[in-house]
Amino acid sequence: MDVDLAKVIPVERVTVHQSASSKKRLLEQMAELLAGPGDVLNCNAVAQTLIERERLGSTGIGHGVALPHGRVTGLDAPLGAFATLDSAVDFDAIDGQPVDLVFGLLVPSEATDEHLRILARLAAMFNDAGLRDALRKAGSREAVFDLLTGWKDTSAGGR
């Protein structure tokens, strides 16, 4: 079963050319983007969720990409946010490279299978060098949104 990212990440939760001074500040900014204006989500609680997950091990998956994520009680459906950074930030990534592409993901506390399916989809997407390059060159949130939601897995066994 494939994952429709258009249902996970609204265009309003995409930002380009963001700057962050540190990993912690980047996680706080992702929490702000995920919580959004006027939403039910508490920005501080979301930040704490992302930071606590990060303490278990870096969500920097390599190639300049991080997938900070966490479970949130009271959330009805998965919610994503994405940012491209002006300057890469040290993120303790698995390959040691700093991060400049960040996809934040929140899922309902009970959404185990869905959470794993979305993370698998994101990992496959960000393994695509062409997509990473296109995201880094995209100049608008709409262009980034279109790249994220329009990506098709062309690898062996892809959907």
Image (spheres, rainbow, N blue to C red):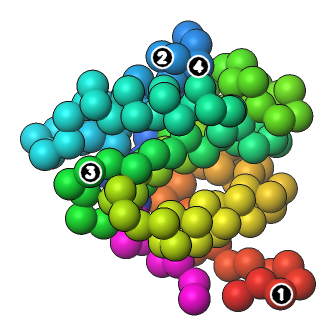
Q: Amino acid at mark 2?
A: Arg
* Residue highlighted by disc 1: 157
Residue 23 image label:
4
What SS does tag 1 mark? Answer: loop
Residues 100 and 16: in front is: 100
Residue 25 image label:
2
Q: Residue at x 70, y 88 (%)?
A: 159
* Residue highlighted by disc 3: 73
Q: Amino acid at mark 1?
A: Gly
Query: Which mark is in front, 1 or 3?
Result: 3
Q: Is residue 90 magenta?
A: no
Q: Is residue 99 left or right of residue 50?
A: right
Dot 4: few (<14), some (14–19), or many (≥20) neighbours within 10 Å?
A: some
Task: Measuring from the top left, give residue 122's x and y in whole percent.
Answer: 64, 61
Q: Residue at x 48, y 29 (%)?
A: 52
Residues 43 and 128: in front is: 43
Q: Quadrant of the N terminus?
A: bottom right
* Mark 1 and mark 4: Cα distance apart in space: 34 Å
Task: Measuring from the top left, give residue 67's x and y in whole percent.
Answer: 60, 45
